[in-house]
Amino acid sequence: MFGNESALRDRVKAVALRDRAKAPEKGTGQVPWWTVLLAAGWLAQVLFRVVLESWRSVPLYVPDEVGYLLGGRLLAGGADGDLTGRLLYYGGYSLLLAPANWISDDPAIVYRAVLVTNALIAATLLPLAYLALRRLGMNQIPAYIAATLAALITSNVHYSQFALTDAVLPVMVLGWLLLVHSWLTSERQLHGALAGVLAAYMSWVHVRGFVVVIVFAGTLGVAWWRRWANRRGITVMAWLLIMTTVAGIQLNDWVRSQLYPRGAYGLDELLIDRITSLSGLGWTLSLTAGKLWYLVVSTWGIAGIGLIALAVAVKRDRVPMGTRVVAVQAAVSMVGVALATSAATPDEGTVANFVYGRYLTCFAPILFLAAVVLVTRAPAFTALRAVPITAAITMAAGGIVWLHAGDQLSRDFFLSTDFAEISFLTWNWEEFHLWFATIVALLLLAVIAALSVYGGRKAILGAVGLVAVLNIAAVLATTNHVVSYWDKRYAATASLKYELRANDKVGVNFPELGWRIWVLQAFQSRHGLVPIDRFGRFPLPADLTVVVVPWTPGTALTKTWPAAPADWRIVSAHKPGFGGWVAWRRVNTTTAP
C-alpha cells in the first residue's frame, strides 16, 4: 500500500506462488487448510455473537429496531403497523429480516432469529478482511490475526446485538471496496457490476448508502473519462447502478405507504436549513468533528492511524492505482456520511447531538486494516510519526466539540447505549467525560504502536493481545452495564410480551400513552395495533381481546378506562419507567395461550 507499484506486484505474486505451492493439488479431495481456518474463524465469530445476545428479550433501540422489524414482518407477508410520524426506516435491511418471520410468528422467536441473522452476516467481516490484507501482500498468519481483530472491533460486535443496519453495513462497505478493487485490477466487468449493485443496495438499507452511490457514480465517471476500463462496460455499470437505486427508492416508497399511512417524519427542511445558514453549518461541522473524535477514540486511537494511512495511499503516486482509488472512495464516503448525517440530525437535547459514533462504525474496519498495513509495511519512523499526528487530530476534534457544546456535555441527557466504548474507557456509565476518554485512548495507542513497531515477536503478540483484550472486554462490559440494564428496564416497563397470547387482537388508546410503549408493543402484537378511545367516543371493535390504555398520575386503576365494558378486567399495570399504562383483557376470551 505504501511501496512502489512494481514492488507490491512482485510481493503479491510471490505470496500467490507460495500459497499455490502449499495448496493441495486438484483431484486429491483435500480442502485447503486456510479455507478450513477461515471457516472456523467465521464460525467462532458467529458463536461469540450468538452467545452474547442469547439472553436478549426485547428491542432496545426504539423506534429504530421496531421500524426494521415491522418492515421485515410486512415483507414476509405478515401484518403491517402504523409508525406515522416516526422516521422512515428503509426496507433493504428489513428484506434480510423477512426470513426470520417465516420461521415463526412469535415476536420473541423472530427477534432472536434476527439477531442470529446479524451474527451470520457480521462475522463475514473476518474472511473479507483477510482477503483485503492478502491482496495488499500480507502473509497468511499476520493477515488472519489482523482480520480476526478487525472482526472483533467493539462497535461491530456491539451493534450486532440489535436489529440495526449497523450490524451489517461494515460488511457491505468492505465488500463493496473489495469489488471495486477487483474490477480495477482485473478489468473484469462482472466485479464492477456487482460493486454497483451492492452500492445501490446499501441505499435500500440506509440513507448512508446514497453517499456510497454518489461516490461510486463519481468513480465510474472518472473511470470512463480516464479509460480505466472498457467504456461500454462502464456505461452498463452506470445504468445498473441507477436502476438498482431506483428500485430501492420504489421499495421504500411502498414501505412508507404501508407503515406510515399518514406520513413519516421528514428531515428535508432541517437539512436545507443546516446547509444554508451559518448556525446550521456550525452545528454540522461541529457534530462531524464529534463523529471523527468518537471514531478514533472508540478504536483506541487505531482508526486515527488508519486515516493517516488512507491519506498516504491517496497522496503517493507509487501506490497502485486500484489501491489509491479504493482509498479515495473510503475517505470521501466517510466524510460524506459524517457531513450528511450531522446536517440531518435534529436537536434532541442530548450529548449525542455533539458526539456520536454509530453512523461511522461501518468505516471502522477499513481504517483498522489501513492502520495495520501502515504499521507493518512502512518504516518504523513513519509508523511512529503517525501517533502524534493522530493525537493532534483527536485533540483538535475534541476541542471543537468542547468549544461548541460547553457545559452541555455534562448537563444534557446522556444515554449509555450511544457511548459503549467511551463509557468503558472512563468506566462511567452515567456521565460523559470527553478529555478523560481522549487521554486514555491516546495512551493505549502509544503503547500499542510502540509494541508493534519497536518490539520483537513477543512484543507484537503483546500488542495483538492488548487490542483483542480491549475489544472483548469493552463488549462484555458494555453488555453487562448497558445492554443488560436497559433490556431489563424496558422489559419491565414497556413490554406487553407476557400479557399477550398468540391470536390476541390488541387495541391501544394512543393519546397520553408514551410513544416508546406503543411502538414496542406494535412489534409484540402479531396482528398490529388498533386505535381505540377509552372514553367511548367511538365503538370498540368487537374482535379485540386486549386493550392498552395510559395510566395518568392520580387516576385509580379501575378508572383508567372509563368506557370499559363489563366483561373486561385488568391483567397488568405498569407505572414506572417510560409512563404508566394498564392492560385490560376480555374475560370471555377463548384465545389459546
Image (tube, rainbow, N blue to C red):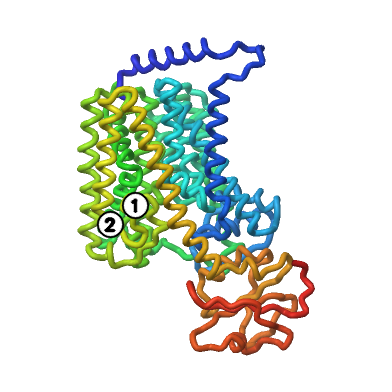
Please identify the quadrant where the C terminus is shown. bottom right
Mark 1: give few (<14), some (14-19) or many (20+) Cα within 10 Å: many
In the depicted view, which residue is nearer to us: 538 or 164?
164
In the depicted view, which residue is nearer to us: 153 or 14?
153
Q: Is residue 355 left or right of residue 574?
A: left
Residue wearing tag 1: 422
Residue wearing tag 2: 433
- Residue 9 higher or lower than 78, as above or below: above
In the depicted view, which residue is nearer to us: 57 or 312?
57
- Residue 134 higher or lower than 11, as above or below: below
Q: Number of callouts in the render?
A: 2
Residue 581 appearing in the image: yes
Q: Which amino acid type is shown beneath numbered disc 2? A: His
- Residue 188 higher or lower than 255, as above or below: above
Q: Position of residue 297 (x, y in %)?
A: 31, 46
Q: Residue at x 35, y 22 (%)?
A: 320
Please identify the quadrant where the N terminus is shown. top left
Quarter assignment of residue 498 = bottom right
Q: Are marks 2 and 1 in contact (CB under 8 Å)?
A: yes
Q: Is residue 2 left or right of residue 575?
A: left
Secondary structure, mark 2, is loop
Using the numbered discs, state the Cα–Cα distance from disc 2 to disc 1 in whole angstroms.
Answer: 8 Å
Secondary structure, mark 1, is helix
Q: Which amino acid type is shown beneath numbered disc 1? A: Ile
Q: Position of residue 221 (x, y in %)?
A: 41, 35
Mark 2: give few (<14), some (14-19) or many (20+) Cα within 10 Å: some
